Each structure stands twice: as C-alpha cells, then as structure tokens.
Amino acid sequence: MLFRLAYYSTNLIKRPTNPAQSELRKLVLSAGTKNRDRGITGGLMFNRNYFAQVLEGDQTSVSDLFCRIAKDTRHRSIVIVHASIVDGRMFEHWSMGLAEKTETAEKLNSKFGLDNGFDPTKMTASELSNYVFEMISLEDHLITVPISTPD
C-alpha cells in the first residue's frame, strides 16, 4: 500500500552566501538517491521561514524516514498535516525535488491566496500538498533526483 505524509516546519538554516553550495542542495542530492533506492518519492520546498515536504512510499519506509527528518536540527516545530494511505503517487517522477523561492513561488502564492508569501499555517493539507507538487512541477531551476522511466 502507498502511504503519503506531508508536513511543514520552521526553517532554522541561515541563507548561504553562495547558493550553489547550500546545505539543502547537498542534502537533496544525497537524500534523493537514498529515497530512490527505498522507493520513496516526494518534494521539498522552503523559504526563509518554513520547510514543506511531501513523502510517498511504503508506510514503514516513509515513517522511518520521517523519524530521521524529525530529529534534524535544521528545523523545528514540525506539523504533520497529512498522513494516510493513498491510491497513487503525486511525485512519481522525483525521488526528491527541491524548489526554492522564485517567480514560480510568487505566482503560486497568488494562486493559493498567500498575500504575504508561502505560509503553510494558512493552508489546508490538500493545498499544501498541491502547492509543493505544483512548485516541483513548474520550477525551471529545480534541484532534483529523478526517477528513471523505462523506455
């Protein structure tokens, strides 16, 4: 059975002076490869205040991963907004995709009625998952570990 977990948390990472060397970029590339090997897909987006992530896969694998994520000192105040069995994957093409603040985020903020920027405390569980999915789907400068598809 396929399990989906969505959460947001408070971002404690300071902005790097060189974005190409950011902690998050390194994390996404490393975690994405491990996630792919474990059958986990998902998306992560952040701004200076929040992280939002959606994870999909086997319930045990997702739960184990989330327990490790919850211990990470780069964030705090974790709020799980969705955790349930689902019929299909939203993020079937990415073991992990990272979307940062861009023009895409500004357009989505408007679409989702977020006048003061991305704020998951103002969103439903469905809105949060859809926001992360659209951000990952639409972002041109995505840092991603794709899932290979058979030819």
Image: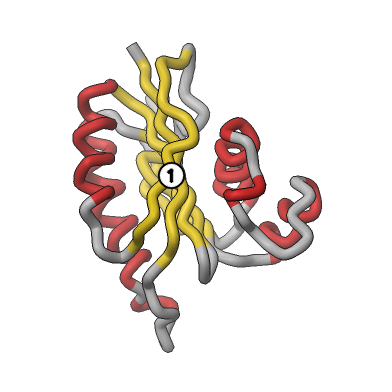
Toward the bottom, the furthest residue is 17
Q: Is residue 47 above or below residue 3?
A: below
At label 1, counting other C-alpha atoms closer than 10 Å, the crowd grade (few under 14, some 14-19, many 20 or more) is: some
Q: Which residue is mark 1?
A: 79
Number of marks drawn: 1
Q: Foreground: 74 or 97?
A: 74
Amino acid residing under circle 1: Val
* Numbered disc 1: secondary structure: strand
| Quarter of the image that includes the C terminus | top left
Identify the residue at horizontal 39%, vertical 49% (top origin): 78
Q: Is residue 24 left or right of residue 113?
A: left
What sort of colour scheme is used for the picture? secondary structure
Q: Quadrant of residue 130?
A: top right
Which residue lies at the image location 47% right of the left edge and 30% below the top edge? 82
Q: Residue furthest front?
A: 77
Residue in view at x 73 percent, y 64 percent: 116
- x and y percentages locating residue 22 in the rendered image: 36, 74
Is 99 left, or right, of 31 in this rendering?
A: right
Residue 21 occupies quadrant: bottom left
Question: Residue shown at 33%/11% (left/top)?
Answer: 1
In the rendered image, residue 46, in percent from the top left (x then y), is placed at 50, 60
| Residue 54 place in picture, x, y as percent | 44, 39
- Indicate the position of residue 53 as horizontal and vertical percent values: 44, 45
